[in-house]
């Protein structure tokens, strides 16, 4: 009987190919201030880690960011006012000359306390 059943049994289905791995996030493209603030904080406190995680700061795409207030603020009060961590910001001096800031509507205090800019 098993010979007869094997003859008429449906052939095994091929194993479907595995799903492709998710695409890695595109480095250095920011659509909101909190994400950019986190990246700036990391860059200024640990540049090699910032480079590894986000790519070089000079190539970051910040064209969608409207609020850049206190982004590089180095005063102690900045952290409690939305300016993120102040670690390393007093001496942080990255090349951001190629950033497209045309969408920015608020750049108040962006470099307060950042003596190297």
Image: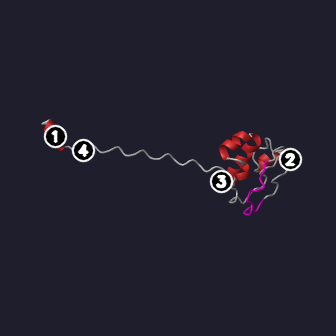
Of the numbered discs in the image, which one, if any, rests on residue 116? 2
**Looking at the image, do the residues carrying marks 3 and 4 touch, with CB atoms under 8 Å apart?**
no
Query: Which residue is pictured at 68% across the width and 47% down the height?
Result: 55
Q: Earlier in the sequence, mark 1 or mark 3?
A: 1
Q: Position of residue 83 (x, y in %)?
A: 77, 49
The residues bearing labels 1 and 2 have C-alpha atoms spaced at a distance of 81 Å
User: How crowded is the residue under tag 3: few (<14 C-alpha within 10 Å), some, or many (20+)?
Assistant: some
Q: Nearer the viewer, mark 4 or mark 2?
A: 4
Q: Position of residue 109 (x, y in %)?
A: 82, 54
Of the numbered discs in the image, which one, if any, rests on residue 5? 1
What secondary structure is marked by label 1?
helix
Query: Which residue is pictured at 64% across the width and 49% down the height?
Result: 27
Q: Is residue 34 magenta?
A: no
The residues bearing labels 1 and 3 have C-alpha atoms spaced at a distance of 59 Å
What secondary structure is marked by label 4?
loop
Q: Earlier in the sequence, mark 1 or mark 2?
A: 1
Q: Nearer the viewer, mark 3 or mark 4?
A: 4
What secondary structure is marked by label 2?
loop
Provide the residue span drawn in magenta: 94-106
Q: Nearer the viewer, mark 1 or mark 4?
A: 4
Q: Which residue is mark 4?
A: 11
Of the numbered discs in the image, which one, if any, rests on residue 23? none
Q: Earlier in the sequence, mark 1 or mark 4?
A: 1
């Amino acid at each position: 009987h098993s010979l007869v059943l094997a003859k008429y049994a449906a052939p095994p289905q091929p194993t479907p190919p595995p799903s492709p791995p998710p695409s890695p996030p595109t480095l250095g493209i920011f659509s909101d201030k909190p994400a950019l603030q986190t990246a700036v904080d990391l860059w200024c406190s640990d540049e090699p880690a910032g480079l590894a995680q986000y790519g070089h700061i000079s190539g970051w795409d910040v064209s969608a960011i409207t609020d850049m207030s206190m982004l590089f603020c180095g005063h102690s009060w900045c952290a409690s006012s939305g300016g993120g961590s102040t670690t390393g910001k007093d001496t942080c001096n990255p090349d951001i000359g190629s950033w497209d800031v045309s969408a920015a509507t608020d750049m108040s205090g962006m470099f307060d306390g950042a003596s190297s800019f």
